[in-house]
Amino acid sequence: MKEDIEKILIKEDEIKAKTEAIGQRMTHEYKDRFPLVIGVLKGAMPFMADLTRAIHAHLEIDFMDVSSYGNQMVSSGEVKIEKDLDSSVKDRDIIIVEDIIDSGLTLSYLVSLFHHRQANSVKIVTLLDKPEGRKADIVPDIVGFTVPDEFVVGYGLDYAERYRNLPYIGILKPEIYRGS
Ligand code: PRP
Ligand code: MN
Ligand code: MG
């Protein structure tokens, strides 16, 4: 598996340190607010698991799974709900946890949806931000690392469903996704 990685972009201990720092900040921000922390499947799974354990305050967790219609995300950003939340977001303080923001279309949809469902507040925490990919006007509240416009995998991020279990973020060798 690691022979498919061209370069390690963010090491395991760097992710760990950053997650602790974000958790500490959120511990203060959400003290006594009982936020609903929503992980976006599947990519956010490892970050969600580590971040929620770094927030030392009461919180509730839930998951949502969305996908784009067809193969490519249409420019309208219309997405299909594959799995909806178990809980209501009405009057809740929502924290959306993502592994990466690229075009921003997924989050643009989710943020509007939660506002429409009358959430009290909606904040976005993402481990990675790829600003060069942006098509929708989405600005995350907390970003772990800004990444260049490269094919990154690991720590939740996949290529064809692989590499999600790598403990670090790496750049995939182009020959892997070029299929040579
Ligand atoms: C990836 C990633 C984000 C989204 C970001 O998920 O995990 O959820 O795309 O892209 P965007 O900003 O351009 O909308 P994907 O739909 O690949 O599903 P996955 O998490 O199951 O891999
Ligand atoms: Mn995802
Ligand atoms: Mg994916």
Image (spheres, helix red, strand yellow):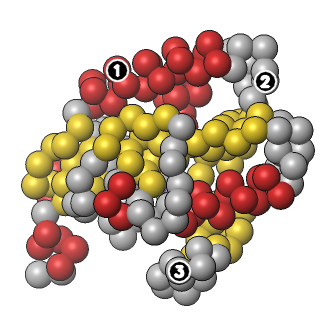
User: Which labelled disc corresponds to residue 75?
Assistant: 3
Q: Residues within 10 Å of mark 1 (few under 14, many from 20)?
A: few
Say what amino acid the circle numbered 3 marks.
Ser
Residues at badges 3 and 1 in contact (C-beta under 8 Å)?
no
Say what amino acid the circle numbered 2 marks.
Phe
Q: Is the CB of the residue bearing disc 2 within 8 angstroms of ligand 1?
A: no
Q: Could you tell which of marks 3 and 2 lies nearer the N-terminus?
A: 2
- Vertical side of 155 occupied by 42: above or below: below
**Secondary element at tag 1:** helix
Question: Which percent across, then down, holds residue 65?
Answer: 64, 60
Q: Could you tell which of marks 1 and 2 lies nearer the N-terminus?
A: 1
What residue is rendered at 14% in x and 69% in y?
174
Question: Which percent across, then down, holds residue 168?
Answer: 27, 40
- Vertical side of 49 occupied by 83: above or below: below
- Vertical side of 93 occupied by 18: above or below: above
Q: In whole angstroms, how far apart are the C-alphas of marks 3 and 2?
A: 35 Å
In the picture, which quadrant includes the N terminus? bottom left
Q: Quadrant of residue 66?
A: bottom right
